[in-house]
Image (tube, rainbow, N blue to C red):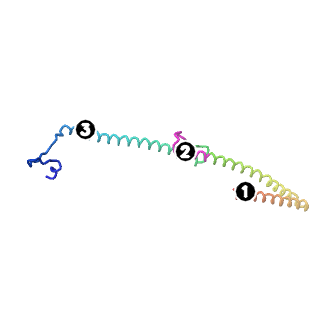
Amino acid sequence: FDFWKRYAEITPGGLTLVVGRDIEDQRPFAATIRNVALWSVGLLALVGIGAGLLISRSVLGRIEAINAAARTIMSGDLSSRIPVAGSGDELDRLSASLNDMLTRIEELMGALREMSNNIAHDLRTPLNRLRNHAEEALRHPDDPALYRAALTKTIEEADELIRTFNSLLLIARLE
């Protein structure tokens, strides 16, 4: 009865007037709207899942390419580079930064190899002279003056080698 009070009017004779409306024509329309909404939600869910799978496969493919390049680089091939897709996204910027870093590391490793070769050549000469002086002393054990001169030259060469090693250690500490 409370429900009808809200929607009913009392007439002057004390009778209650209830006004109703036939909504039978609107029921098929409401059912159609409900079906369209359900189909739309389902279709959007399928499209969302499909798009998510495509995007994740694309991203995972690019990440796997980065991993493959990293494995190649870790195996010792510093000339290998990480592929850049050209889309300009975060993965491309990361790949470009890593490639720049690899280029710099490759340059530094080349400089280190060159420096090592130079050091080896710089040390080989005094070591050969040191050996030659020692052999000369051994060839003339009965001549004390020649023996003494060869030993003196050997000590001088050894001192020169020690200075070279100290310079190398100083450079290493400074770097």
SS at circle 1:
helix
Separation of residues labelled 1 and 3 (CA atoms): 83 Å
Residue furthest to the left: 13
Q: Within 10 Å of the Cα at label 2, are there few (<14), some (14-19), or many (20+) other Cα atoms?
A: some
Q: Horizontally, is 40 left or right of 7 in the view?
A: right
Residue 97, horizontal then vertical, whole percent = 58, 46
Q: Which residue is mark 2?
A: 93
Of tags 3 and 2, the one toward the viewer is: 3
Residue 83, horizontal then vertical, whole percent = 55, 41
Residue type at mark 2 is Arg
Q: Horizontally, is 139 left or right of 16 in the view?
A: right
SS at circle 2:
helix
Q: Which mark is residue 171?
A: 1
Please report the residue visible at 12 percent of the width from the left and 48 percent of the height from the top: 10
Query: Mark 3 touching mark 2, by CB under 8 A?
Result: no
Residue type at mark 3 is Thr
Main SS, magenta residues:
helix
Query: Mark 1 touching mark 3, by CB under 8 A?
Result: no
Please report the residue visible at 55 percent of the width from the left and 45 percent of the height from the top: 95
Q: Which residue is mark 3?
A: 32
Of tags 1 and 3, the one toward the viewer is: 3
Residue 85, horizontal then vertical, whole percent = 52, 40
Separation of residues labelled 3 and 2 (CA atoms): 50 Å
Q: Horizontally, is 38 left or right of 10 in the view?
A: right
Separation of residues labelled 1 and 2 (CA atoms): 35 Å
- Bounds of the magenta segment: 84-102
**Image height of 6 relative to 159, above or below:** above
**Image height of 60 relative to 128, above or below:** above
